[in-house]
Amino acid sequence: MSSGKLLRRLLELALEYRRPCLAVVVMQGMLVWLSLSTLGLTGLGIDYLQSCVLKNAEAPKWPFGWTPPESWAPMTVVTALSLAIFAVAVMTAGLKYLAAIASGALSQQILIRMRTEIYSKLQVLGFQFYDAGESSSIINRAAGDANNVRNFIDGVIIRLITVILTLTVYLVYMMRMHPLLTLACLATTPFLWAMAVVFSTVVQPAYRRASELGDVMIRTLVENLQGIQVVKAFARESEQAKKFEAANHDIRDLKNSIFFRLSTFQPAMGLLTQINMLVLIAYGGSLVVRGELALGAGLFVFANLLHEFANQVAHITNIANSIQSSLASAERVFEVLDQPVLITSPENPVALPVIRKAIEFDHVSFGYRPDQLVLKDISLRIECGECIGVTGPTGAGKSTLISLLKRFYDVSSGTLKFDGHDVRSLNLDDVRRSSGIVFQESFLFSNTIAANIAFGNPDADDEQIREAARLAAAHEFISELPLQYETIVGEHGSNLSGGQRQRLALARALLTSPSLLLLDDATAAVDPETEHEIRMALESTMRGRTCVVVSNRLSTLRQTDRIVVLNSGRIEAVGTHDELMESCDYYRALAKLQGAPTEPATKRRRLAVAS
Ligand code: ADP
């Protein structure tokens, strides 16, 4: 996206917050006015003292046509002026406090909105997005980049308006005092602007790179945390630490190079503004000597305004800096927000909360990439209440078949139908909720066991949760835990065994009373005893329920009505255990490896009759 387009979108975002922005700008404007009042009062004080000390000095110009009463002694006048300056200082402090609160609240509001938008978008984005992206980059976009986008509104827009307002007020004030002196002192200002522009174009690529390096650093950290078992098992802690350190050093080097540019830029700007001071002392001083400019209300106020002017111009460096970092981050944030949502409900979806007749794969082909089909011309009808086993070598496409049933992806060609309706014509929530799924490795949230089981059905009461746990053969082990259903599951279920995690996942799937149960190699990673327990539990839950069970375990496959053998994305054979033992070489080999008698069933029957 071009910088112009990004700027336009950021400005549109800022426009939505025009009211709070305006409130902050008004407060900043009042602060400028108060600072001018302080300066004016101090200058007046100097001129008054000068008139008291030097007999031939010009009388000070009192504001609003007011002059101190004749009866006031000089000390009374000076005290009155001091009190007025103090009152302005108190007002300034109060206003600064309010401005800080208003701007802090605004920035939090924007930050929360950006993060919520990113998070909501991540919820609806399909797996294609997650397959292509990296979770560390996504984390960085939601955390760091969202913050930089927020900074565009309070760190750029508000500050820029404030700076422009302040500079304009100062300029008008100075021009009214002495136009020629003002022009002479500000002759270097155009160079300051030019420098700011050059600086900002030089640093923008560096900011984009900084965000990318942030991704690498977060990825190293996240991977290390997730793979801590492997890291420790292979004693690679110090190498991992070095990797993390290297990622941090890369960020440091890049940030240093940005700071280096910033550091050369700021003193250069400072030097240019000091030239203004030289002009003021030489030219302004001569005006005072000639009596054309007052010492206090003239030269003193001028010197301070010039100093403030230089400060405000120096802010432009920071603003230019913020613009570049905001633009680089905005690009990354909008990249996520603009991602097309490929898998959605159609405009007028067919409602099908329960599958009552059949599921049908009608010449379905699918590839994660268009040029590489993973499932090829699959045709299969699964009647309601039927339990289908799916087996085949690794990479055959078994899990992919399950993903299509959940509409995690859409078919590349052919049609997947639920009760005769193309799944793409159905309400997506209906499709997702009509089936319960248990993966090979089940993810559990850091919450209580009860909350984990009730994840798909948060309204379930305690008895329903217990019933689901009983069906999944989980109730017994949960009852033995000190806090039973209120036990907090560690992150990813770290305080539970693999078998316990799977049983909770099964209970979670069953609690939604799905019309279709999908088990994606759910017992592959558990020990034979747990597998046996889960299998026993499944026997009752699978009865009469439509199931698709991916497994390479003969014991599980034998529980199903029909078994589909997938090979290289194609259906190689479909049949019962006995049929496949006769007709499918792959299945026979699989059975042999697991200790099943290898003769086809008919031969075994013949042998049994003969004996
Ligand atoms: P199985 O479950 O039979 O082991 P999968 O369905 O997981 O097989 O995978 C089938 C093929 O698709 C494999 O070649 C695998 O590498 C590929 N694959 C699986 N998931 C993805 C993905 N998210 N992106 C790209 N390719 C994938």
Image (spheres, grey):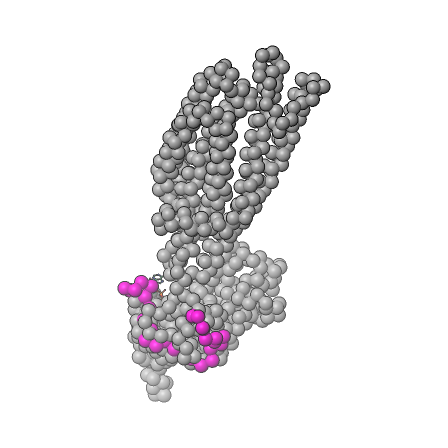
* Outermost residue to the left: 371
Which residue is at a point 49% across and 32% down the rendered structure image? 172
Is the residue 519 above or below the residue 582 in the image? above
Residue 561, image quadrant: bottom left
Location of residue 123 in the rendering, given as x and y in whole percent from the top left corner: 46, 60
Looking at the picture, how far across and down is residue 367, in whole percent?
32, 66
Give the x, y percent position of residue 14.
48, 48
Name the residue nearer the viewer: 317 or 356: 317
User: Quarter of the image holding residue 296?
Assistant: top right
Q: Is residue 322 above or below residue 435?
A: above
Residue sitting farthest toward the front: 65
Q: Quadrant of residue 360?
A: bottom left
* Residue at 48% across, 25% down: 178
Residue 335 higher or lower than 83, as above or below: below
Q: Quadrant of ligand 1?
A: bottom left
Residue 51 visible here: yes
For the point 54% across and 72% down, the residue is: 471
Q: Is residue 197 left or right of residue 163?
A: left
Tell whether 306 sits left or right of 577: right
| Residue 538 visible somewhere in the drawing | no
Horizontal and vertical percent position of residue 149? 45, 47
Above or below: residue 351 compared with residue 198: below
Q: Is residue 141 left or right of residue 572?
A: right
Q: What span is in magenta?
A: 346-372
Pick the front one: 339 or 227: 339
